[in-house]
Amino acid sequence: MALVRATHRYARISPWKVRRFADLIRGMSVENGLNALRYLPNRGARIIEKVLKSAVANCQDRNARNVEKLRIVDARVDGGPMFKRVMPRSRGQANIIHRRLAHVHVAIDAPEVKSGS
């Protein structure tokens, strides 16, 4: 069993907005996962869909034969660094605004692909 991975680091979206779509496709086949994400109107779904397509392309690059039978083993979204901005408030106070970034990881189980580099 070889895991083929794809990541999108420093995605300019909050991890909360993407994590629900990662939870949606985890454990599905690749074909079902792409179909589930295709008709969702959210930007987070587009990001996960692109990373999933990249993982499938990585499988094809490693000569996986049955691309339609691949399974999504791991789909997770981690928090990245934050941009910190200051918003002026009344009476000389200031609020800190956190512009969040996300790291998106997708792993596919490709049984006939040899692991290694």
Image: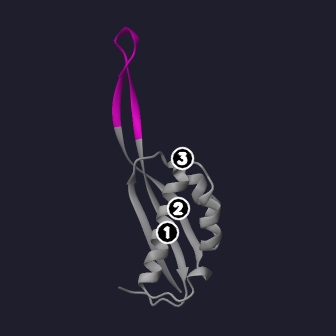
Foreground label between 3 and 1: 1
Side (left or right) of 32 relative to 9: right
Q: Is residue 94 visible?
A: yes
Magenta stretch bounds:
84-99
Side (left or right) of 110 relative to 8: right
Please, what is the three-letter code of the amino acid marked with disc 2? Answer: Glu
Whole-angstrom CA distance, mark 3 to mark 2, is 16 Å
Q: Position of residue 18 (x, y in %)?
A: 53, 51
Q: Which mark is residue 49?
A: 2
Instruction: In this rendered view, identify the residue nearer to me: 61 or 80.
Output: 61
Please, what is the three-letter code of the amino acid marked with disc 1? Answer: Lys
Q: Position of residue 61 (x, y in %)?
A: 41, 82
Q: Is residue 26 visible?
A: no
Q: Earlier in the sequence, mark 3 or mark 2?
A: 3
Instruction: In this rendered view, identify the residue nearer to me: 61 or 117.
Output: 61
Callout 1 crowding tier (Cα within 10 Å): few <14, some 14–19, many ≥20: some
Whole-angstrom CA distance, mark 1 to mark 2, is 6 Å
Assign a secondary structure to mark 3: helix
**Are the two marked residues, 3 and 2, in contact with CB atoms closer than 8 angstroms?**
no
| Residue at which label 3 appears | 16
| Residue at which label 1 appears | 53
Callout 3 crowding tier (Cα within 10 Å): few <14, some 14–19, many ≥20: some
Assign a secondary structure to mark 1: helix
Instruction: In this rendered view, identify the residue nearer to me: 31 or 4.
Output: 31
Q: Residue at x 39, y 16 (%)?
A: 89
Q: Main secondary structure of the magenta part?
A: strand
Please, what is the three-letter code of the amino acid marked with disc 3? Answer: Trp
Q: Is residue 52 one of those drawn in magenta?
A: no
Foreground label between 3 and 2: 2
Q: Residue at x 37, y 23 (%)?
A: 87
**Are the two marked residues, 1 and 2, in contact with CB atoms closer than 8 angstroms?**
yes
